[in-house]
Image (cartoon, rainbow, N blue to C red):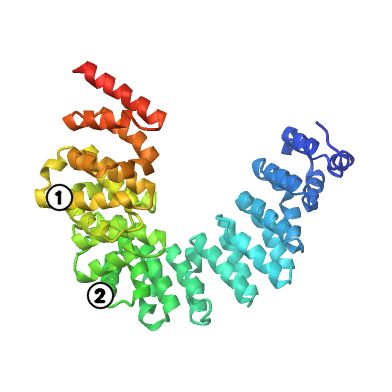
């Protein structure tokens, strides 16, 4: 369909957002010339969020590269939301937006606009970015803009820029962390050797970046270098060193020795406040069998499904060790108590004969600890405790489930009827008789049904 500027004005200067969205749904980029494209793009300046979102979606989905020049004009806007929308669209255009961004960067003098445009350019991976930035970087001494250009060179793995980046490294302290990061991404032998040489002479921030880079581009030399650093590293450096060591272990298959320093580092990782570091610790857990390390992992089980998924198989392989550690942890009324009880239940479901393999003293201790959970304030904990007691020792379980407990736990009574349905034991009948007289009709009727089925099946 033919489109005119007058028609665009008629549609988009109204407040009828549904008509505007319907129009955009039917429009194709090839149906209008650059002037029409630019005019349509100008309606992004309207502050209606619905219209702005619809136009943004249209330009991204249809790849209307004709509007790249117009979008760069919005970089100078006082409307931060408009600037961000323009940046999002330009980044999605990738290499097709580079020429427009370069034109803008060459003509603008405003430091804020320069920084914003340079940030957009840094997010684009395209051959043209490398050549453009190598030219532009020589034309500014604005550190914020230089940082964006350095990031652009790193993101585009610009081998041509290595000598220039090393030169800048020796000229400007502020740029050092960003240059290390960029050199790490570029990842040549020269950048690796340069990064390694700087380690002992730099401050903590730069050291941190060097460690991260060695994890990304390192080799056998850096693997053993990082392990040696781990021996005397201050606490803040242990997580990034361990993460870098783990990356190299995965990439090259290098063996990680399990000594006291590595064990200490692994305990720190498992107890770290940042989830990503805990997950690295969880992955390393698969390499070692150690009671203290497994105990630390169990303290965090149930807080993160990804973490749980990583260590679950390891826990299954070390059931005896896990049972001993869970005994100790349950006593502390740990916040993840319900998750640990559920884990025990899953162990028994996975391997029913496990109960018979537990020695009598340990089993008695476990039953005693779980029975104490019947008084826990969390109903989920009480529910898992009941289920486990019935699986571990039904006679003891029934002994603990007195009238006071049952009267306070309606949903547990409902669950009990389901459990008792699958259990063949003489005491079950007496307990079902008791439940069949419960004041709650749902409980009593269900108990009567199960009793009837059991009696008629014998």
Rendering quarter of residue 107 = bottom right
**Residue at screen point 53% across, 64% down:** 153
117 lies left or right of 248: right
Position of residue 6 measured from the top left corner of the image (x, y, whole percent): 90, 41
Quadrant position of the C terminus in the picture: top left
Q: Alpha carbon of mark 2 to alpha carbon of mark 1: how far? A: 42 Å
Q: Which residue is mark 2?
A: 231
Q: Which residue is mark 1?
A: 364
* Residue 78 seen anywhere in this rendered image of the structure: yes
* Residue 348 seen anywhere in this rendered image of the structure: no
Position of residue 452 measured from the top left corner of the image (x, y, whole percent): 28, 19
Q: Nearer the viewer, mark 2 or mark 1?
A: 1
Helix, strand or loop at label 2? It is loop
Which residue is nearer to you in this view: 103 or 279? Answer: 279
Q: Residue 313, which numbered label? A: none
Q: Give the vertical position of 263 relative to 389 (above or below).
A: below
**Residue at screen point 24% across, 68% down:** 262
Which residue is nearer to you in this view: 86 or 156? Answer: 86
Say which label, 2 or 1, has the lower sequence index: 2
Which residue is nearer to you in this view: 170 or 344? Answer: 344
Position of residue 332 measured from the top left corner of the image (x, y, whole percent): 28, 61
């Amino acid at each position: 369909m033919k489109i005119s500027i007058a028609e665009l004005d008629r549609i988009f200067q109204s407040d009828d957002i549904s008509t505007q969205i319907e129009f955009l749904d039917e429009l194709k980029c090839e149906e209008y010339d650059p002037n029409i494209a630019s005019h349509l793009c100008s309606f992004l300046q309207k502050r209606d969020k619905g219209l702005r979102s619809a136009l943004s979606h249209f330009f991204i989905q249809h790849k209307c590269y004709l509007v790249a020049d117009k979008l760069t004009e919005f970089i100078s806007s006082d409307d931060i939301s408009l600037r961000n929308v323009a940046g999002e669209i330009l980044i999605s255009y990738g290499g097709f937006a580079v020429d427009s961004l370069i034109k803008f960067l060459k003509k603008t003098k405003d430091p804020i606009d320069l920084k914003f445009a340079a940030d957009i350019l840094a997010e684009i991976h395209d051959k043209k970015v490398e050549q453009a930035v190598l030219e532009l970087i020589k034309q500014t001494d604005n550190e914020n803009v230089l940082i964006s250009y350095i990031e652009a060179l790193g993101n585009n793995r610009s081998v041509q820029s290595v000598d220039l980046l090393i030169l800048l490294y020796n000229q400007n302290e502020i740029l050092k962390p960003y240059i290390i990061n960029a050199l790490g991404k570029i990842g040549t032998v020269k950048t690796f050797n340069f990064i390694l040489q700087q380690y002992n002479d730099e401050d903590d921030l730069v050291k941190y970046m060097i460690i991260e880079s060695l994890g990304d581009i390192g080799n056998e030399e850096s693997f053993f270098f990082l392990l040696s650093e781990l021996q005397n590293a201050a606490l803040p450096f242990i997580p990034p060193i361990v993460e870098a060591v783990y990356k190299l272990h995965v990439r090259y298959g290098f063996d990680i020795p399990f000594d006291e320093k590595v064990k200490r580092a692994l305990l720190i990782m498992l107890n770290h406040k940042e989830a990503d570091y805990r997950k690295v610790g969880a992955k390393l857990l698969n390499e070692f069998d150690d009671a203290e390390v497994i105990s630390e992992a169990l303290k965090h089980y149930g807080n993160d499904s990804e973490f749980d998924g990583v260590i679950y198989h390891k826990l299954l392989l070390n059931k005896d060790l896990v049972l001993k550690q869970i005994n100790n942890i349950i006593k502390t009324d740990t916040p993840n108590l319900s998750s640990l009880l559920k884990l025990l239940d899953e162990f028994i479901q996975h391997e029913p004969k496990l109960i018979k393999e537990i020695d009598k003293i340990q089993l008695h201790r476990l039953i005693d600890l779980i029975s104490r959970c019947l008084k826990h304030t969390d109903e989920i904990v009480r529910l898992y405790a009941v289920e486990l007691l019935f699986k571990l020792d039904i006679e003891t379980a029934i002994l603990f489930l007195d009238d006071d407990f049952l009267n306070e736990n309606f949903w547990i009574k409902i669950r009990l009827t389901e459990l008792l349905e699958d259990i063949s034991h003489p005491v079950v009948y007496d307990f079902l008789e008791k439940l069949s007289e419960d004041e709650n009709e749902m409980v009593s009727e269900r108990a009567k049904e199960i009793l009837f089925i059991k009696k008629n099946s014998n």
